[in-house]
Image (cartoon, rainbow, N blue to C red):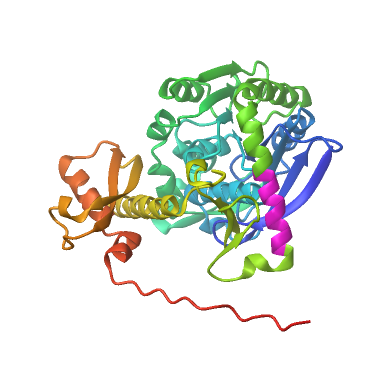
Amino acid sequence: MDSRKVEFAGSSGATLAARLEMPAGDATPIAFALFAHCFTCSKDAPAAVKVSRALAARGVATLRFDFTGLGGSGGDFASTNFSSNVADLIAAADYLRRMHRAPALLIGHSLGGAAVLAAAAQIAECKAVATIGAPFDAAHVEHAFLQHVPQIEADGEARASLGGRQFTIRKQLLDDLRRQKQKERIAGLRRALLVLHAPGDGVVGIDNASQIFLAARHPKSFVSLDRADHFLSRAEDADYVAGVIAAWAARYLASPAAAAADAAAEAAAAEYRAAEDAGAASEPGVLVEETGQGLFQQRIRIGRHAIMADEPQSMGGRDSGPAPYDLLAAALGACKAMTMRLYANRKNLPLRRTRVHVVHDRIHAEDCADCETKDGHIDEFRVTIGLEGELSDEQRARILEIADKCPVHRTLHSEVKIRTEEAAREAPV
């Protein structure tokens, strides 16, 4: 098979080392998967290598990488925690989305399993999640350095021997592990879930699998890894796990619509790479260019991201991307969602998830009782916000109030100056 050495920037900015296992020859991958290794392990751990390669042999390209401060990756392990591992997973998904296709399948081994359960909601393209020997509670990893916990609590850090290597464990890691709300995340996963666990696992007990399975909603499946150990040390166990995951995930990964979307995404990624090589992606701001395909189709480049804009067929377009006002509504909705998330996290509010629905319309000014303009038409954005979580009425009201303070909302309400000028003309040849 085709094993490629790749690198990308992690959540802290450090360069993360990775391996992308691709199907042999010129075969187009069925889908892309992302593998998260166990606590203090690396991308070269037997389970990570064997499962990733076995999946690639079955047509699922799989990226495995070292978390910040581990293996070949840069950064300081002592400064990392569970939340930074989840952020590294998001960065890995961004890399795949940018260069190939976003991962439709997330796989996590041990604490990596807890990490993919936490990251799935932040990867929109993810359709299925598989865990291998994963703990139900992220804080379970404390058992790996239990004898050092009193010193960590007292002194703020301690040196611990894990897997024959010395690591500095700081109190911030303990605090971060203990405040994770995995039960709520699993219940709100909204993805197909496969739980694989060995009944004789001596590192993470089988009861963890039961708790994960009971907390999850359907579709969910459980497979017992009879005779396997926690680290899938035997090649036949790793190969069995990969075969089960590939067979189980197939129904969620392959559909005509998904295949068409993936092909379009891969074409966009190839186009982005070509533009990046030419230096176009480094231009500051937002760059909008006509594609020449249809009357309205535009290619939009925003830093390292590329999207399409168009008009619906009823307006003479090809409906190949959102319309300009849809993009404006999306900016408003995304800004409100991010602002609410920042506020909820800062105040430790039990906000599990938000949903923002924005509709743009042109209405008669005379129909708007609270508008200053009384003649002609005005633009109206109707925003409906859904809040999930055990929140009080007071907390909900405050979060909705904060949503209206997001920067894009304020920009739309403030005086805006737009200056338009012609770009410098190229000298005639």
Closer to us: 362 or 169: 362
Please give the name of the residue rendered at 37% of the width and 44% of the height, measured from the top-left corner.
179
Secondary structure mostly taken by the magenta-highlighted segment of the chain:
helix
Task: Assign the N terminus to one quadrant of the image.
Answer: top right
In the visual, does 33 lie left or right of 334?
right
Q: Quadrant of residue 274?
A: bottom right
Please give the name of the residue rendered at 43% of the width and 57% of the height, measured from the top-left corner.
156
Q: Position of residue 51 (x, y in %)?
A: 72, 31
Give the residues in magenta.
265-276
Task: Assign the C terminus to one quadrant of the image.
Answer: bottom right
Taking 101 as reference, is 242 above or below it? above
* Tally of numbered tags: 0
In the visual, does 322 lie left or right of 378?
right
Asked if residue 267 lies in the magenta stretch, the reply is yes
Please give the name of the residue rendered at 29% of the width and 43% of the height, measured from the top-left corner.
385
Residue that lies at the very extreme toward the right in this rendered image: 25
Asked if residue 186 lies in the magenta stretch, the reply is no
Please give the name of the residue rendered at 77% of the width and 22% of the height, measured from the top-left corner.
236
Closer to us: 323 or 341: 323
- The answer to whether one can see residue 100 in this image is no
- The answer to whether one can see residue 181 in this image is yes
Taking 277 as reference, is 417 above or below it? below
